[in-house]
Image (cartoon, grey):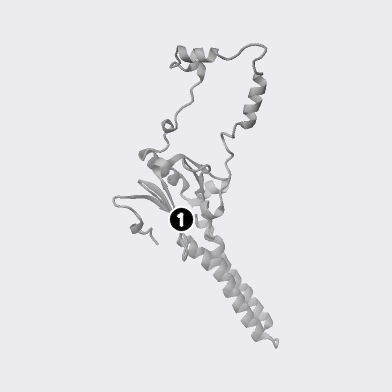
């Protein structure tokens, strides 16, 4: 199932299109043979008994439910999940009947990084973390295939669209190194009272430390509903 071209704007080109890693399909692929084997064994054991027909019906119902819920549904959702990087933005689309979409424009991207365990590195999978300027916390996409290429394409696209530019956020200049300070600024600094009636600097600093908000909030994992791409989605 290719990504619908009708969702792209005029002139937009797809750079990379991936789905969750194939390891998400291991359990859905292995489960049907196991269920068939266990079901056949139960039917064979119950054949000489008077409740053979009841066991046969029960095994059939349970087998269909288990295979449908744990194999067919995850495989269908995996097939309907798309992570697309175009030359302008990131597009995420998931869901079969009720669909969810996420759009991250390249100019709003402030950082791109990957998180990979040892098993992820062997399989070529990983988690993509994308910082966005209009959100306190970054977007987190788990279990993506070809994660190295995906991250490279996202960085390349963001740089072309004006993202990943620290100059947009400005820089902090210390008062001691500010060459633009004039005589008026120096006079303003000298107006601070310095004597017995002056406020205690330690008290002022303590009050500021209590009131100052956290500048760098801890990176927290976002809700699984909006930020992750699990196999069962």
Placement of 172 over or under 92, stated as above or below: above
Q: Position of residue 36 (x, y in %)?
A: 59, 73
Looking at the image, which residue is at 67% across and 12% down? 196
Q: Quadrant of residue 51?
A: bottom right
Residue pushed farthest front? 197
- Which residue lies most toward the right here? 49
Neighbours of disc 1 within 10 Å: few (<14), some (14-19), many (20+): many
- Residue 206 picture location, percent across and down: 66, 26
- Residue 190, placed above or below residue 218: above
Of 127 and 107, which appears nearest the observer?
107
Quadrant into which the N terminus falls: bottom left
Q: Residue at x 64, y 86 (%)?
A: 53
Spot the residue most to the bottom.
50
Q: Which one is nearer the viewer's eye here, 229 or 55?
A: 229
Local SS, label 1: loop
- Residue 210 position, x and y percent, is 65, 31
- In the rendered view, would you say 129 is above or below 30? above
Left or right: residue 214 versus residue 97 is right
For label 1, the residue is 19
Across the whole image, how many numbered discs are drawn on residues?
A: 1
Q: Is residue 102 left or right of residue 223?
A: left
């Amino acid at each position: 199932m290719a990504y619908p071209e009708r969702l792209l704007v005029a002139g937009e080109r797809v750079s990379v299109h991936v789905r969750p890693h194939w390891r998400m399909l291991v359990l859905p692929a292995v489960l049907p043979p196991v269920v068939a084997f266990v079901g056949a064994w139960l039917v064979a054991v119950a054949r000489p008994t008077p409740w053979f027909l009841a066991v046969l019906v029960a095994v059939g119902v349970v087998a269909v439910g288990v295979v449908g819920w744990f194999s067919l549904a995850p495989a269908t959702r995996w097939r309907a999940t798309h992570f697309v990087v175009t030359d302008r933005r990131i597009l995420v689309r998931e869901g079969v009947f009720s669909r969810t979409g996420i759009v991250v424009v390249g100019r709003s991207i402030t950082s791109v990084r990957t998180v990979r365990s040892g098993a992820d590195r062997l399989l070529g999978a990983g988690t993509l973390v994308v910082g966005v300027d209009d959100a306190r916390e970054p977007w987190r996409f788990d279990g993506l295939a070809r994660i190295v290429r995906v991250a490279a394409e996202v960085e390349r696209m963001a740089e072309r669209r004006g993202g990943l530019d620290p100059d947009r956020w400005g820089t902090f200049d210390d008062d001691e190194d500010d060459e633009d300070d004039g005589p008026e600024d120096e006079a303003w600094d000298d107006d601070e009272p310095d004597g017995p009636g002056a406020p205690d600097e330690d008290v002022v600093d303590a009050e500021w430390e209590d009131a100052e908000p956290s500048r760098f909030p801890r990176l927290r994992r976002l809700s699984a509903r909006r930020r992750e791409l699990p196999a069962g989605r």
